[in-house]
Amino acid sequence: MSRNAAPLGARPSDGHDTASPTAGARTPQGRPAGRATTRGVVLAAAVVLMAGVGAPAGAAPGDPLVSGATVNSGHDVVVGITHDVVFPVTVSGSDDSGLSFVDVDLKGPHGGFYTTDAFCESTTACTTVFTVNAHPAPGSDDPVDLANANAGRWTVDALADAHDGDSVFAPGAGSFSLKRAARLTVNASPEPVTKGGRITVSGKLVRANWDTYRYAGYAGQTVQLQFRPKDSSTYTTVIAVKTSSTGTLRTTVKAVKDGYWRWNFPGTTTTGPAKAAGDYVDVRP
């Protein structure tokens, strides 16, 4: 079976992501009973508002309209290997009779696909909930929803129903980024150090591997070494360093004042950002 779309009934229902072809069929006005969709999960995110995106050519006044989609409250969806990530997708639109129901499809690289549906919470907004994971499930031979190849830009398609029975399909109503989680470590030494001496700052950048359910070194990435003085709340970038073939980092800097050293990784199109916790170094006269 596909890693990204389970067969009908393959997942237990929680009221959001799972549907059976017959059981519990929902029948808003204008929707045939028994209409079912495959349930899956996905992540990341951006706010996209595209006026008129759901208006087909020649649409008459009063026909339903999808104006846009908001994914994960405008934030990227970043997934690791140990926890489910749950996020909302809200479809906005209008109709003379009000919106009643929405089907939402999420489509990503290399065949990534998830879908779910929901009744609308108001006449102009309908929120669905998706759950994504990339970790083994006990007793499952195909435990995950995501593979590394699925990371990147995803799009949102929406099919909205109105109370008067009209419907509108809005392909590309929104887009977002689904990213692999990253982690950073840091170690600054010696501690303490004499003013004017040299501080060696090391660390490692790793990111989630959705195929092996482990974190692995992220090679060839530019990472910023940042410093925050003891009595300041602001970090500034001192130097940029590239990770080794195994994701390690190492550089030396001059000891000037007491403060905290950290590594900062801004992220890529497929990997989320990461910051190491600051490592304090006491600089003595």
Image (cartoon, rainbow, N blue to C red):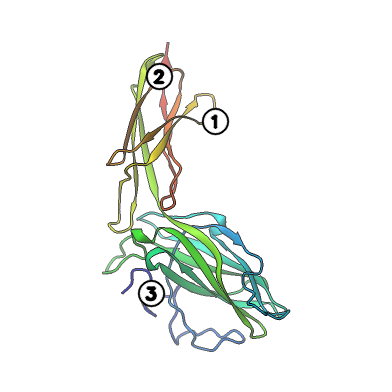
Location of residue 12 by image quarter: bottom left
Q: Which residue is mark 1?
A: 233
Q: Amino acid at mark 2?
A: Lys
Q: Is residue 108 above or below residue 118?
A: above
> Distance between the Cα atoms at labels 2 and 1?
21 Å
Say what secondary structure mark 3 lies in.
Answer: loop
Location of residue 40 by image quarter: bottom left
Q: Closer to the camera, 165 or 268? A: 268
Kindly check if marks 2 and 1 are in contact, taking CB atoms under 8 A apart as contact.
no
The structure residue drawn at horizontal position 32% and vertical position 43%, both measured from the top left corner, is 219
Q: Is residue 144 left or right of residue 71?
A: left
Tell me, yes or no, if residue 109 can be seen here: yes
Q: Earlier in the sequence, mark 2 or mark 1?
A: 1
Q: Which residue is mark 2?
A: 254
Q: Earlier in the sequence, mark 3 or mark 2?
A: 3
In the image, farthest residue toward the top: 285
Per the rendering, the mark at residue 11 is 3
Tell me, yes or no, if residue 134 can be seen here: no
Q: Is residue 5 left or right of residue 118?
A: left
